[in-house]
Amino acid sequence: MNIEELLEEIQDTNLTYLMLAQRLLKEDYAAAQFRLKLDDDMAKLLMSLSTKQLSRLARTNQFLFRLCFDNADQVQKIVGEKRDSAMMQTHASLLMSRVAAGHA
Amino acid sequence: MENSEKSLVARMHQVQLAVNLIELGARLQVLETETDLSRGRLLRLYKEVRGISPPKGMLPFSTDWFLTWSPNIHSSLFYGIYQRLTEEQGCKRIDAFVKAYRLYLEQVMLDDSEPVLGLNRAWTLLRFFESGLLELAECTSCHGRFVMHAHTPCKDYVCGICRPPSRAGKTSKARAQAHEATEHDEIVVSLDQHAQRNAQDNSVPAPRAKRAAGMR
């Protein structure tokens, strides 16, 4: 795969993310804020942007969002659980809910 | 005039809250504490929403239940979400409670497991936290926060997921599910070989979709 294609995919993913974020925020603001881990200012700003502004924001060679887990150890613990895959999801969700909004 | 209109809107919110709570399985005690509506109205609402009279009897009142293995994990997930909504996002207490409970259910349904923490239990959990009987302790291994009795020394605490008790999760149901899962894998394998059977096997993931729809 050449770099142009990869860059395009990054931008597509960015735009998809931004548009989904907007939709979620419009549907249920508080729940979306929780899911997206955004503070109030950022959530309100994202919601107010036009599609044109969103695509401008998406047009970059980097991802607009990043992994929300603090450290690799934590992820290793989650994926390394052998006993019960449902528990793995629950564990992941529990650990992710700890990540503060605006954390970077 | 303005005053009476305002109270009408406020009343509507109260009814909506009660309906939301009833739909999620709230008992009458929860409704009476959390809304300003009279017992008579709540009874009528309950019957209208559920089609049956509310169950009688006391709510569970032991903190110990929340410390047992699977309830502890579910309670910790729910309370973690609730705390984020209230402390971080400034949601009002009861709104955050309903939203957190829905988000909790959502996750449990995704995991294809049972909502171990019922709404009434979730509510008692909230009250136990508010009265200082329970606290969150941080697991030294995964750094998740888990429900604990207040004032328990928790310097070396390790949670039930990182160090599960030997028999945890090994119920006959879990075994049956594991068996089902392997069967499912076998079906998928045989599907690859016999592509024409595709249509027939589409029914396999259906129960999950149905359950997710039922939760709305």
Image (cartoon, grey):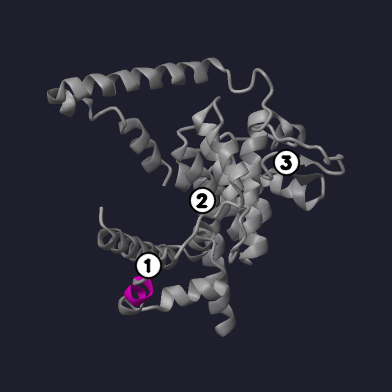
Name the amino acid type tagged 3: Cys
The residue that mark 3 highlights is B139
Q: Is residue B22 above or below residue B191?
A: below
- Are dots 3 and 2 on a single chain? yes
Name the amino acid type tagged 1: Asn
The residue that mark 2 highlights is B45
**Which region shows up in magenta?**
A54-58
Quadrant of the frame with the N terminus of chain B: bottom right
Nearest to N terminus: mark 3 or mark 2: 2
Is residue B110 in view? Answer: yes
Q: Position of residue B168 (x, y in %)?
A: 63, 22
Magenta run includes residue B32: no
- Marks 3 and 1, Cα distance to the nearest angstrom? 38 Å
Residue at horizontal 49%, vertical 75%? A44
Tell me which chain the residue with mark 2 is part of: B
Q: Position of residue A25 (x, y in %)?
A: 44, 66
Residue at horizontal 39%, vertical 36%? B211
User: Given the current orientation, which residue lies at the most extreme bottom position?
Assistant: B1
Q: Position of residue B2 (x, y in %)?
A: 56, 84
Residue at horizontal 57%, vertical 17%? B171
Count of numbered labels shown in the rendering: 3
> What is the crowding at mark 2: few (fewer than 14 residues within 10 Å), some, or many (at least 20)?
some
Magenta run includes residue A57: yes
Question: Which one is in front in this view, the residue at disc 2 or the one at disc 1?
Answer: 1
> What is the crowding at mark 3: few (fewer than 14 residues within 10 Å), some, or many (at least 20)?
some
Residue at horizontal 60%, vertical 37%? A77
